[in-house]
Amino acid sequence: MCAVKDPVVIHKGLDNVYVKESKICFIDGEASKLFYRGYSIEALASHSTFEETTYLLIYGSLPTRSQLEDFTKRISLYRSLETSLLQLIHSFPITSDPMDVLRTAVSALGLYDPQPASDRIEDRIDKALRIMAKAPTIVAAFDRLRNGREPMPPRTELSHAADFLQMLIGKTPGDYDAHIMDVAMILHAEHEMNASTFSCTVTASTLADMYSIITSGIGTLRGPLHGGANEAALKTVLDVGDPSKADEYVVRALAEKKRIMGFGHRVYKTWDPRYVILKKLGAELAAQKGETKLFETATAIEESALRHLAGSPIFPNVDSYSGIVFHTLGIPTDLFIPVFAMSRIAGWTAHAIEYLQANRLIRPKALYVGQKELPYVPIDSRQE
Ligand SMILES: CC(C)(COP(=O)(O)OP(=O)(O)OC[C@H]1O[C@@H](n2cnc3c(N)ncnc32)[C@H](O)[C@@H]1OP(=O)(O)O)[C@@H](O)C(=O)NCCC(=O)NCCS
């Protein structure tokens, strides 16, 4: 048995552990800054599109006009689902959680790929783009089927964001709703080495196929401390129901040591820059639709939480307003995490591809603190 020479340092939660060098995303959690491939999130949210941002994340530079046209066309043509996959989705219990449906359907997509495990980088990217293109179709189809409606076919002339809303709601969205959805997808497309991206990276490091890589990410994203917080944050706002009740809720939650959903972040110790953008969009959207109460309640919760948490590094994160924006766009609450996943496939892919270009199997260690050399006790001799 080898003796441990140096004292072992356990990095619980892998805080501050770096697993690779990366050129994809930079977060300055003290200065409220986020960059994708060197471009600020504010610039991308103002000027880019989800398709262009995906190209940037995966290929490393902004596309030329013709590159973007080809890329956009390619994604739009990949959106339709095989009839057998639609039938599979149709066979799922209508009570299924949409995130389980997305995870299962993405995994099943690999069964229809004649070469799921091809490991040429270009093939891997192509498979990932097919998954990314089909994810909104899967999510929207399941939602319609569970509500007794026929799935809407994808429409190649629409943007990725607009097509998702069209397939979900059943009519072409207005330009403003499509724009808000597009920006929300850009904001959710990438966020450095978070839990789900690490999960994808671990799976990629074994040289597993893209379907397994993205399925790992979807499974990891769904927990309430990661992707699930937007759903939980909206539920809080709906439960509180009125701005006048916000302070009472916050005081009680903090006294009971409960977490305010949509607050706090492992990396941001100040404002999450995505929150700033989403709050502004949320305010505009609420005013445009004449549905301001939810937004005002969220703002009252935020103001109260900021007052009571003053002096701590706990600030609103992306999830404090994303749920309200999605809700106002007509997206059902249990689709929020799938929508997050649909967007994040871009970032997962970029990281998996980057890692594979200098791959090393990820295999950390656990410090064993259990017993050793125990005599084996036959089952009849064990005490109940
Ligand atoms: C995201 C999150 C897991 C990151 O937290 P972290 O860096 O691991 O910080 P910790 O869980 O160690 O918390 C540190 C302290 O801040 C408190 N804290 C963290 N987030 C809090 C929140 N949202 N509300 C109230 N208190 C919070 C913790 O209770 C803890 O207090 P303690 O030291 O008195 O026990 C955490 O902030 C959280 O659970 N937030 C709510 C869920 C959420 O919005 N997630 C979306 C992230 S984008």
Image (tube, grey):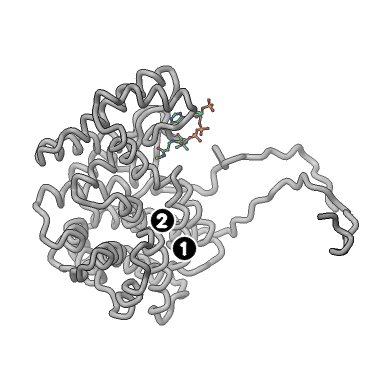
The quarter of the picture where residue 138 lies is: bottom left
Q: CA distance from mark 2 to mark 1?
A: 8 Å
Instruction: State left or right for residue 176 relative to residue 277.
Output: left
Residue 184 in percent (x, y) is at 25, 46
The quarter of the picture where residue 214 lies is: bottom left
Tell me if residue 256 comes above or below residue 371 in the rendering: above
Total marks placed: 2
Q: Which residue is mark 1?
A: 213
Query: In this orientation, which residue lies closer to the viewer: 147 or 161?
Result: 147
Task: Say what secondary structure mark 1 lies in.
Answer: helix
Tell me if residue 381 comes above or below residue 226 in the rendering: below
Tell me if residue 110 comes above or below residue 335 in the rendering: below
Instruction: State left or right for residue 298 relative to residue 269.
Output: left
Q: Which residue is mark 2?
A: 348
The quarter of the picture where residue 324 lies is: top left
Query: In this orientation, which residue lies closer to the viewer: 136 or 42?
Result: 136
Query: In this orientation, which residue lies closer to the viewer: 319 or 13?
Result: 319
The mark nearer the N terminus, 2 or 1, is 1
**Local crowd at mark 1 within 10 Å, few (<14), some, or many (≥20)?**
many
Amino acid carrying label 1: it is: Ile
Q: Residue at x 9, y 52 (%)?
A: 174
Residue 22 in percent (x, y) is at 45, 48
Q: Are marks 2 and 1 in contact (CB under 8 Å)?
A: yes
Q: Quadrant of the C terminus?
A: bottom right
Amino acid carrying label 2: it is: Trp
Q: Residue at x 46, y 23 (%)?
A: 255
The disc label shown at residue 333, or none = none
